[in-house]
Amino acid sequence: MHLLFATSIVPDGALASGYEIANAAIIAALRRAGARVTVIGFTWPGRAAADPENTVVLGSVDVRTENASAPQKLVWVGKAMLSGLTFASIKLRAVSDSDVLAAIERAGPFDGYVLNSVQFVGAFEKLFEGRPSIFVAHNVEHLSARENAAAATGIFQRLLFRREARLLEVVEERLCRQARFVFTLAEEDRAALGVGSDDRSAVLPLVTGAKARKGPRHIDCDAALIGTWTWQPNRIGLDWFLDKVVPHLRPDFRIRIAGSMPSGVTSAHPGVEFVGRVPDAQAFVRAAAVIPLISTAGSGVQLKTIETFELGLPSVATSRSLRGIDHRPANCVVIDDPAGFARALEAAAADIRDVDGSAFHREQIRALDAAIRLGLDKIGVVRQEAFA
C-alpha cells in the first residue's frame, strides 16, 4: 500500500516542535504497519527533507506569523479575505494548484492519502479528492481558534480568530465527512469533530522518542518549562502560570523558561528567568527538579507531557495537560487550582522522585500501532472496492 502523506512542513529531522514530533511518530508507525509513505509539503527556509527519496518538496516557506513583517501579515490577511481561505492556509499558497497537482502525479500512483491536519489540505483541498483518505486531526482547530479569540486583547486579532473559527469548522466537518477514517490525538476530540464512533475514528497515542539517561541528575533549578510560547494556546497556558501560579511560590523558588517568547511576557517573581533557545531541550528539562505541565487551552495532545513521562521526570500538571493520555505515572500530580499547583511544585522540588519511563513508552507504541492498523484496514477496504 502506497500512501501520500500531505502536510504543511515535511520532516527535516530537527523535531523542533510538537507538530514535527507528532508527524515523525505517525509516519514511523505507518511504515511499521507495512505502508510505503511518500510525504509532500514544504520545508522551512534553509532546511532539507530528512528523507529526500520519499519526500516531494514543493518549496520553502516560513509560515510563522511572529517572523513575518507587518506588510507580509497584511498581504496574508488580504489574500485570505479575497480567497475565502483561512489565514493559516493562505500562507501555504506559495505555489499554484497546477504545481501541486503535477508533483502529486510525478510521485504516484497512490492507494490513498493521509491528510495531515487542516492547514495544508485546506489550501489545496480539491487536489486530494478521487482517492480514499485518512484525516489526521492534530487539534480541533475551530475550537482552538475560538479560545484564541476569547483570549485576544485587540479587536482586530479577535475578529481574525473568530473568522478562522467559522471557516475551520466548515473545513474540518467536510474533511471528516469525506475521510474513510479519522485519527485524533485526544479522546475528547473525536466527539468534538463528530466522529465519535469507533467505526469512524481512533486516537493515536504518541511518543517522542525521549529516553531517560541512567544515573543521578544534576539539578540546576526547581522548575523548567520549554515550548513555542508564540503559539497562542501555549501562550494562554504560560500567562496562567505566570499570573496565577507563580505569585504563590516562595521568592527563592527558581524557574527557568526556554523557547521562543512573544514580546511583553514578564514576571515580577525574582526566581523566574527567561533563557531563550537552548541547545539541548532534554538536558534543559533534566536539570530541573520538577516539570510544570501548564496547558489550559487548545485541543489535541501535549507532546511535552508525553516527553516528561517518557523521561520519568516528576511533574505537576493541569488536567488539560493530560488530554490524549491514558496512563499517568506515579510522580505526576494533577491540580488545576493555582495555589494548589504552586504548593505541589514546591513539594515535588523538595522530594525529587524520578521513575522509569520505559513502560509508558512501550504502552504508547503498542496502542499507537494498533490504532494505525485499524485506520489502514479502512483504506484497504476502499482500495478493493474502488480499484478491483
Image (spheres, rainbow, N blue to C red):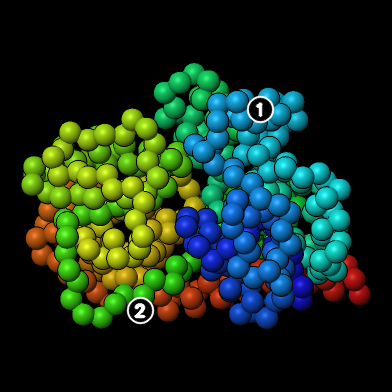
Residue lying at 44% horizontally and 27% vertically, measured from the top left: 152
Residue 191 position (above or below residue 201):
above
Q: Position of residue 7 (x, y in %)?
A: 66, 55
**Three-letter amino acid code at the position of disc 2:** Ser
Find disc 2 in the rendering and name its residue: 358
Q: Nearer the viewer, residue 359 or 194?
A: 359
Q: Nearer the viewer, residue 21 or 203?
A: 21
Residue lying at 12% horizontally and 49% vertically, measured from the top left: 253
Q: Secondary structure at mark 2?
A: helix
**What is the spatial separation of the Cα atoms under label 1 and label 2, in whole angstroms?**
48 Å
Q: Nearer the viewer, residue 340 or 123?
A: 123
- Give left or right: position of 264 versus 248: right
- From where the camera sits, is residue 344 visible? no
Q: Secondary structure at mark 1?
A: helix
Find disc 1 in the rendering and name its residue: 75
**Three-letter amino acid code at the position of disc 1:** Val
Looking at the rendered image, the quarter that the C terminus falls into is bottom right
Residue 225 position (above or below residue 314):
above
Q: Position of residue 239 (x, y in %)?
A: 31, 37
- Give left or right: position of 118 versus 354: right
Disc 1: CA contacts within 10 A as few (<14), some (14-19) or many (>=20): some
Q: Nearer the viewer, residue 66 or 348?
A: 66
**Name of the residue lying farthest toward the right:** 388
Q: Position of residue 257 (x, y in %)?
A: 28, 48
